[in-house]
Image (tube, helix red, strand yellow):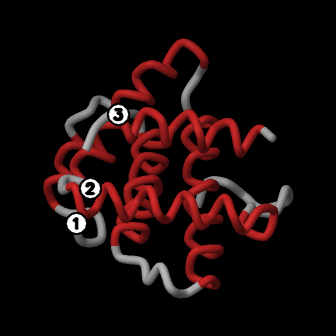
């Protein structure tokens, strides 16, 4: 339930805004200039990489959707683990800006929404294992 709530929270923030190649230099530069500690920087980079995979996914492949969603949810969980409670607003701003830099066209936003819809349809198959490490 926590994963679903976290996914919907981050998706809601992301959808209120507006893709790239594997963490573009624009996104890398943004991450390095965001005043993050090393753990936070790794977590945000992991999140950015998962968004990039979504931007480049073949939505026709059920296996890809399941696999990428597991990575995406692990990246979100990692963000939640490395930011303290009082830092959550900063985490949401940074993750939203990474989303906006990745999904910067209407076509990519539509693809993101389609991905989320497909991942939700897959149900528990698309959830990471409870034993999986969230942070790489």
Q: Which residue position is annotated with label 1?
A: 20
Q: For the residue labelled by badge 3, is the local secondary structure a helix, a strand or a loop?
A: loop
User: Is the residue 8 above or below the residue 47 in the image?
Assistant: above
Q: Are marks 1 and 2 in contact (CB under 8 Å)?
A: yes
Q: For the residue labelled by badge 2, is the local secondary structure a helix, a strand or a loop?
A: helix
Q: Is residue 88 left or right of residue 37?
A: right
Q: Quadrant of residue 26?
A: bottom left
Residue pushed farthest top? 86
Residue 33 location in percent, x, y?
20, 37
Q: Disc 2 versus disc 3: distance between alpha carbons?
A: 14 Å
Q: Identify the residue at image location x=62%, y=64%.
A: 119
Which mark is on residue 16?
3
Residue 27 location in percent, x, y?
22, 52
Nearer to us in this view, 30 or 18: 18
Q: Which residue position is annotated with label 2?
A: 102
Q: In which quadrant of the rendered image does the N terminus lie?
A: top right
């Amino acid at each position: 339930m926590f994963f679903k709530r976290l996914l919907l929270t981050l998706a809601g923030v992301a959808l209120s805004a507006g893709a790239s190649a594997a963490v573009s230099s624009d996104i890398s530069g943004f991450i390095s200039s965001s005043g993050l500690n090393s753990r936070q920087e790794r977590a945000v980079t992991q999140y950015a990489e998962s968004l990039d995979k979504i931007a480049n996914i073949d939505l026709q492949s059920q296996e890809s959707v399941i696999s990428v969603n597991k990575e995406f949810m692990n990246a979100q969980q990692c963000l939640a683990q490395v930011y303290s409670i009082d830092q959550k607003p900063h985490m949401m701003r940074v993750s939203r800006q990474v989303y906006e830099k990745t999904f910067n066209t209407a076509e990519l936003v539509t693809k993101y929404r389609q991905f989320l819809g497909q991942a939700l349809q897959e149900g528990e198959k698309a959830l990471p294992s409870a034993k999986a490490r969230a942070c790489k």
